Image (cartoon, rainbow, N blue to C red):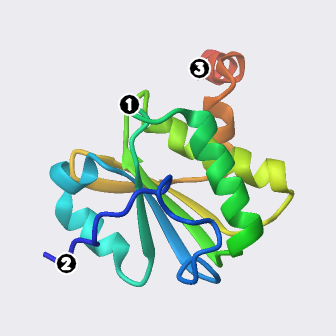
Amino acid sequence: MGLPEPRRLLSTSVAARDVAGADLLIYSECLRHEWPDILARWSKGRLALSVCLEEEHISHITAKLATMLVMGKPSSITVLTVDGSPHCVQVHFSAQQALRITGLRAPVRHLVVEKGVVHEVGPEVVRKARHLSEVAELMRKR
């Protein structure tokens, strides 16, 4: 199947040799069980690090990612989560917040899995999702 070796973001050194210059995949741990084929496909060529916001706090994930961006200087970040999960959406928020905190401009892709289909959403969608008043305004305009 080609699943990545299980490795947690919070257990990985921010200055680990394999982080430096890497293409990171930050993924929801539940994908390992729910959609292993999708996880295997998106893990290829990337350093895959899992998170679970049911077990870990968003502040810890954000701080770790921000520090990893500064210390490890990864080439890119891909965030892959389950769509519709109130916990998983926070992983996307964390990645964007880490960039905001550091002022860095590493390329970030936001991917969500809905019924076995991977959808890419832009950072502007992630930002809007944090601001419910803006989402409400968009809904009213429909």
Q: Which residue is drawn at 54% across and 77% down?
A: 23
Q: Residue at left 48%, top 57%?
A: 9
Q: Which amino acid does label 1 sit on?
A: Glu
Marks 1/3: CA–CA distance: 29 Å
Q: Can residue 125 be seen in this view?
A: no
Q: How crowded is mark 1: few (under 14 residues within 10 Å), some or many (20 or more)?
A: few
Circle 1 residue: 54
On screen, residue 63 above or below 137:
below
- Whether residue 36 sits left or right of residue 97 in the image: it is left
Of label 2 and label 1, which has the lower sequence position?
A: 2
Disc 2/disc 1 C-alpha distance (Å): 26 Å
What is the three-letter code of the residue carrying label 2?
A: Gly
Find residue 139 and name its label. Answer: 3
Q: Residue 2 carries which label?
A: 2
Q: Residue 96: image x %, image y %?
A: 68, 48
Q: Compared to 111, does 5 lie above or below?
A: below
- Quadrant of res 43: bottom left
Which element carries disc 2, helix, strand or loop? loop
Callout 2: 10 Å neighbours few (<14), some, many (20+)?
few
Q: In this view, does 101 lie to the left or right of 19?
A: right
In this view, the mark in front (2 or 3): 2
Q: In which quarter of the image is the C terminus?
A: top right
Task: Tell me if label 2 and label 1 are in contact, CB under 8 Å.
Answer: no
Residue at horizontal 61 percent and vertical 53 percent from the top: 122
Going from the N terminus, do you reach mark 1 or mark 3 first? Answer: 1
Q: Residue 7, position in %: x, y?
A: 36, 63
Rendered image: mark on residue 127: none
Give the image quarter of residue 4: bottom left
Give the CA separation, mark 2 to mark 3: 41 Å
Residue at image coords 39%, 48%: 81
Say if residue 139 shows up in the picture. yes
Whether residues under marks 1 and 3 lie with C-beta atoms below 8 angstroms apart, the answer is no
